[in-house]
Amino acid sequence: MAETEAPGGEGPAAAAVSQALGRQLALLEEGGRAARLEALAGIEAVLEGPPPLPPPLLQEVFGRLLLRPLTRCLATDPAERCRERALGLARLCLRRGPRPAAALPLLLPALARRLCRHPPGAAEPCEELRLGLLQLLTGLLEACEAEALAPFLPELLRALRGALLDPFPGAKLEGCRAAAACARAVPEHFHMQSESLINPLMQAISHQHYKVRVAVIQATGAVIQFGNAKSLDDVLSHLAQRCFDDIPQVREAVISVIGEWLLHLRDRYSFFHKLIPLLLSGLSDEIHENKELALSYWKKVGLQWEKENEEDIKDKLDFFSVPSYYPPGMDRPELGCRELVIRNIFHILPGLCNDLTDWVEGTRIKTSQLLITLLQHAEDHITQHMEILLRALYRVCSDEETSVVRNCVKAAELIGAFVNPAVSLKLILSDLERSPLPSHLMVLAAIIRGSPRKVLQPHVASLASTLSRPELCQRYEEVFYVEQLLCCVEALIEVCQEDCQEISLQLMKILISITAIPSAGHLHVKLKEATTSLADVQHLSGGVSLYRQHITQLMEWVSSAHDDWTCYSPELLQLDVIATHSGPVIAEALEAFILILKTCLQTSKDPQMRLKLFSIFSQLLQNPDETVNSQGQFCNYLETVIKDILAPNLQWQAGRTAAAIRTTAVACLWALICSKLLSPEEMLKVEHELMPKIVATLDEDSKMTRLISCQIIGTFLTSCGKQIHYSELSNIYPELLKRLDDASHDVRLAASSALISWFKCVDDDDKKALLKANIEVLYQELLIHLDDPDQNIQSAVLDVLKEGGVLYPDCLAREIEAVVHKHRTPIYCDQLLLHIESTGWRYTGA
């Protein structure tokens, strides 16, 4: 017969094999489960030999005798074991046969039915068998020509969709491989129906097994590349999500797929603006290998674009050089890469700026990293996009995630490097003047840091002038705002160096304004460092020299409206900073300083403001030779200080604040006395004006005031005692006597010391005679305190009586005689009598 008379003597062999298979095929058709299994085993024994059938004979036998029954067994046999043996035989025949395409008409529809999940019940229930069927399908796709596969594309796609939706992970994996193989096998026909695979692939792209996710991404790459590119819009958002995948292999798959699309996709030019961001995101991957892969693809894409557009960029290729202003530590990308970004950034930026404020933290981090990369490529071409960029950076600079803020600050530094300050500073300063916000200053500081010194120099004057405006540098309620303002100053000093000479005064005003802010205490160290740096770049020896350079202008600045100051005036706090931080330099502006004190310490002014000014003045007087008197000129203003400043504020007024003012005024006067600025001669000049007011303060509620007042009175009595009129002495001692009953131990001791000075003032017979009655009263009162429970007070009173007893010893002796029997400790009375006797007086009794 014809079919057994093939060339090469194959006819008889085929006939023998047919005869051997006849009984097995009959059993396969009509026998039970055991018989069918036996038949399949018998068929396998015939095919495998020994010896195994040669491929041509195997192909002939399979196509003529085995294909149909094996396919029927695969599709309908109820026994899983039979279907498994039939699948193994089919794979054996197809693998070893030279023409597997011949089996497609029968095999592919059967595979489609067994793999498709619709209608229910037709699909293969066993997971391992479904996997085997898919492996068989993959083998067919890889072994057959496109012409043979094309007519069966609907069946193929139906099977692939079922596989991609299969709940078994192994089936999904094999389905992805089969889908990629199908796309590569029939590209000419595949693109017309490829869209039907997109939805199943995207359903599987977030599978919990990372290997499945990798396979889905790779399959998607092939389906899009060899299919309909319009489906790209449907998959990009899913691929973008995989850029944040925790598994590096998944991110690597995304990088590879995007890179291949950028290199080989037919319509890639239309999708550059969508694909470039995904590939550039890989440049900031945390895994080094992924970074290198993304960089390798990106360079290839750039070089390919250069070759394809060589005529358009010929001039740029001929004159390639790295700009001198290029940020240090960064490698400039190739021309093709830069041109790709430049030509597509208009489409990329809006979406990127929107993602910078996405609610997902990972998206914000990745997007901020991508922004840096885009700016590095776009260079000065970002100028035309400054408004949208600045708006986005303003929003992001208040992000809670520090890495996002850090990346955006780096992006702003690149803007400083690439964009002319005439453009960037104009926009930022305009925004800052319209609505001063910390984010504006943060971006501004970063742009200043990134700007080249020569490029920034023409703009520093206007920049410093704007920042030093009161409405911008005196915002006391916002700590974060103040921190960023300081960052701007630090950036200017760091970048401008010697050029800061031109704006030194404005920078000093800003630093003083920040230092004056009560809530900026945590910035003390940074402020000190900034002041030192500003002095260093001008070759000055520290902050004091800086104050010396500007003290006149600073005092004019701070005192421009001092007549209208209140306790809320920022100038009051600024004066405090200037006065206390300038050290000896304040003496060089002493006239202006005293004028401010004279004007603002009038009793009609705000009490809280006066209290603050007195505190400043008191602090300076603690060490006057290193502050207000460093030039030795303070004595020229002493009369003004005493009569116009201290004396009016010692006058009693109701209220706690007024009492606090009197305390600081008394402290200032005591500081003048202790520092020898108020000499005995000067004391005598002001004694008539000050003494009554000081005596009145002995009744103050403040222990400090009473103590200092006692000390001042004692010093006045010691220095001016011979010139003090007896009537004044008669007014002083009753108040000092009251202080011997004071609740404060220190005040009682100070009052005792002042009474010693009082007795010394009675230095002639006239005063002695006129004050005899007063002295007798003093003896009586002091003897009471000589029996005080406190031994220290007893000793102090004893010293007072020893000093005063020489005036009228007889009178004192009589007083002692009258009270000694009442004393708990008469020893002090005895000591006092002995002292009187030692002076030459002899006691004769009552």
Image (spheres, rainbow, N blue to C red):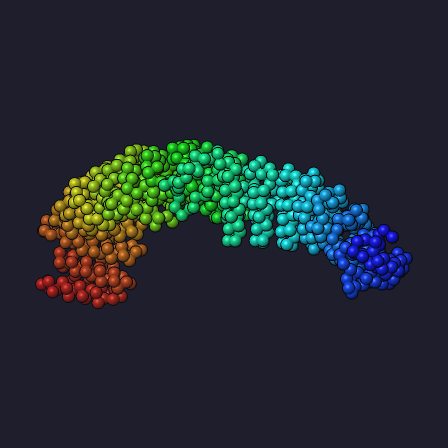
Q: Residue furthest front?
A: 8
Report the label total. 0
Would you say 427 lies left or right of 144 here? left
Q: Nearer the viewer, residue 63 or 776?
A: 63
Q: Is residue 331 visible?
A: yes
On the image, the x and y values in percent for residue 476 come to: 39, 41
Q: Is residue 659 visible?
A: no
Residue depicted at 82% across the width and 60% down the height: 43
Residue 836 placement: quadrant: bottom left
Would you say 809 lies left or right of 64 here? left
Q: Nearer the viewer, residue 217 or 43?
A: 43
Residue depicted at 39% across the width and 35% down the height: 420
798 over 151 or under it: above or below? below
Residue depicted at 66% across the width and 39% down the height: 228
Would you say 59 lies left or right of 239 here? right
Residue 609 placement: quadrant: top left
On the image, the x and y values in percent for residue 738 come to: 26, 52
Q: Nearer the viewer, residue 10 or 820?
A: 10
On the image, the x and y values in percent for residue 278 come to: 55, 44
503 over 174 or under it: above or below? above
Quick one: quadrant of the C terminus?
Answer: bottom left
Residue depicted at 73% across the width and 55% down the height: 95
